[in-house]
Structures are given as structure tokens and as C-alpha cells.
Amino acid sequence: MNFIEKAFKEKLTGDEFLQAMADYLDEPDLESILKQYPCFVKDVIMIIDYDYTKQMESMDEVINGSLEEKFWDIIYALERCGLDTEVKILKKAKQLSLESPDDYDEQWDLIEKELAYYNDYEGFWDKVRAYIDDNISY
């Protein structure tokens, strides 16, 4: 039984479900098992991965590095959670990195402080938990 099956079997909601999804790092074949579950499960995992990478590595890893291939999946997941300010900032950063790579670092330092992590981090996760509760049904 994988971590997602376990969460559904235990009928987890909100924060408990969110915490259970953090086990995605231990799942060797994550992409293939995600296809078996509702879209919101992948969204939650994308958001956790985004947050983890942002904190443990850097925002540039999200924009141009290890998560670059997942960038638009992250954007869509954030949009579906109603995290529009985060989406706006990330899109702006991506555009800067493509159009003005020489100015990107300097510009990014100015807009990074607008992210939820620096302003309303708990509110950010409240929206993710609400998204889970709105989409899970037992």
C-alpha cells in the first residue's frame, strides 16, 4: 500500500492529508501512481515539492533548475488552490529569467519578498488545506 492509498484508507482530511502527502519523497515511482488518483492529489504534492525546493535549495531551482520541467504543473496547482498572488509572482520571475537573464538575480531579490513564505505562510497552507477538503470525498 502506497502513502496515498493509506491516506484515503484512513479517511484523512485537511492538515492530516497534507502531512501524509509529504511522504512523496519516499515513493520511487511517484509519477506512475499519481495517474490513479484525483487531480487534487498531484496538485498537493506539486505544492509541497515547490515549497520544499524553495526552502531547501532556492527559488531559482523552481524557476530554472530542478523543478523547471514541473513549473507549469506547479502554477496550475497553485491556481486551483486560489493562490493567485503566488502565481503572479512566479510567472513574473519566469518571464524575467527568460527576457532579462542578466538582470534576473537583481530583479528577483526585489520581488521575492512578495511570496507567501515572507508574508502569510500560514494563510498559504490554509488555502491548500481548504482545497483538499473541498476536493476529497469519502
Image (cartoon, rainbow, N blue to C red):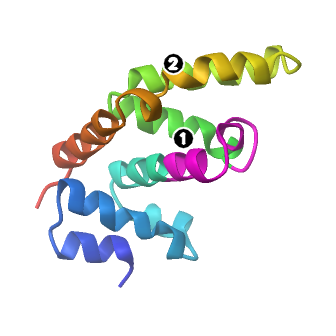
The residue under label 1 is which amino acid type? Asp
Q: State which tag comes first along the sequence, 1 or 2.
A: 1
Q: Nearer the viewer, residue 28 or 121?
A: 121
Q: Distance between the residues labelled 1 and 2?
A: 14 Å
**Could you tell me which residue is drawn at 45 percent across and 52 percent down?**
48
Quadrant location of residue 109? Answer: top right
Q: Is 91 above or below relative to 35?
A: above
Question: Residue, x 36% and y 75% (percent of image)?
Answer: 3
Residue designated by label 2: 88
Total numbered circles = 2
Residue 39 x %, y %: 37, 49
Q: Residue at x 37, y 28 (%)?
A: 83
Segment colored magenta: 49-66
Q: Quadrant of the N terminus?
A: bottom left
Q: What element carries label 2?
A: helix
How crowded is the residue under tag 1: few (<14 C-alpha within 10 Å), some, or many (20+)? some
Name which residue type carries label 2: Lys
Q: Residue 79 colored magenta?
A: no
Report the magenta stretch's main SS.
helix
* Mark toward the viewer: 1 or 2: 2
Is residue 114 or residue 44 the one in the foreground?
114
Indicate the secondary structure of the residue bearing disc 1: helix
Instruction: Rate crowding at label 2 as few (under 14), some (14 to 19) or many (20 or more) other CA atoms within 10 Å.
Output: some
Q: Where is residue 87 in the image (x, y as percent from the top left)?
A: 49, 25
Whether pointer 1 and pointer 2 mark residues with C-beta atoms closer than 8 Å, the reply is no
Left or right: 84 in relation to 104: left
Residue extending furthest toward the left: 138
User: Can you identify the residue that label 1 sits on?
Assistant: 73
Q: Position of residue 61 (x, y in %)?
A: 70, 44
In x, y percent, where is residue 85? 43, 20
Quadrant showing the C terminus: bottom left
On the image, which quarter does residue 22 sit in?
bottom left
